[in-house]
Image (cartoon, grey):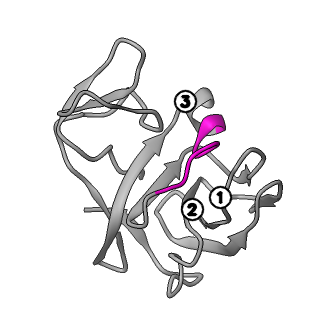
Amino acid sequence: MAAPPPGNGRMSGTGFYVLGNGKEEAAVDSGHDPGRMRGLSVNGTPFCRVRVARTPWLRLRGWIGRRPEPDEALWLEPCSAVHTFGMVVPIDVVFVDGQGRVLKVVSGLRPFRFAACPGAAAAVELPAGRALGITEGSVLEAV
């Protein structure tokens, strides 16, 4: 199950999450409770902040044209394949099943590449090198 978006703010009319400082966060799906801060845990241990993209547009856009923060993940659901066309930096990708169990980890996926995992329910994108220690069989969950 995907985690709701982090932060404290409100949803804008465009479906983006507006933070307390007025900035819009583009990779957050409007179908979540914006008042709850969530993070991502790996095998029950807190890991990083997570944003969720569930609409086709938000999944397609992802991190295109921007650099992810070091302590930030993007959960794409549903998703069994990702591309890095238009990306400016490499990323790590973790594919998970419907229960959050890791099926595949792709490290250092460079810009203008493609990765897939048939049967995955979601993909979690992280800055390159951030998935170190996440292995097949690990469990990712919202905390």
Residue 95 among those drawn in magenta? no
- Do callouts 1 and 2 mark residues in contact (Cβ within 8 Å)? yes
Q: Which mark is drawn over residue 55?
A: 3
- Residue 19 is situated, as x and y percent measured from the top left of the image, at 24, 34
Secondary structure type for disc 1: loop
Judging by the rendered image, the residue that carries numbered circle 2 is 97
Looking at the rendering, the stretch of residues picked out in magenta corresponds to 60-68
Q: Is residue 10 above or below residue 2?
A: above
Disc 1 designates what residue?
120
Where residue 56 appears, as percent x and y from the top left, is 62, 29
Residue type pointed to by label 1: Ala
Q: Amino acid at mark 2?
A: Asp
Q: Main secondary structure of the magenta part?
A: loop
Considering only order in the chain, which callout, 2 or 1, is on the residue closer to the N terminus? Answer: 2
The residue mark sitting in front, 3 or 2, is 3
Q: Secondary structure at mark 3?
A: loop
Question: For the point 22% across and 44% down, which residue is it?
Answer: 7
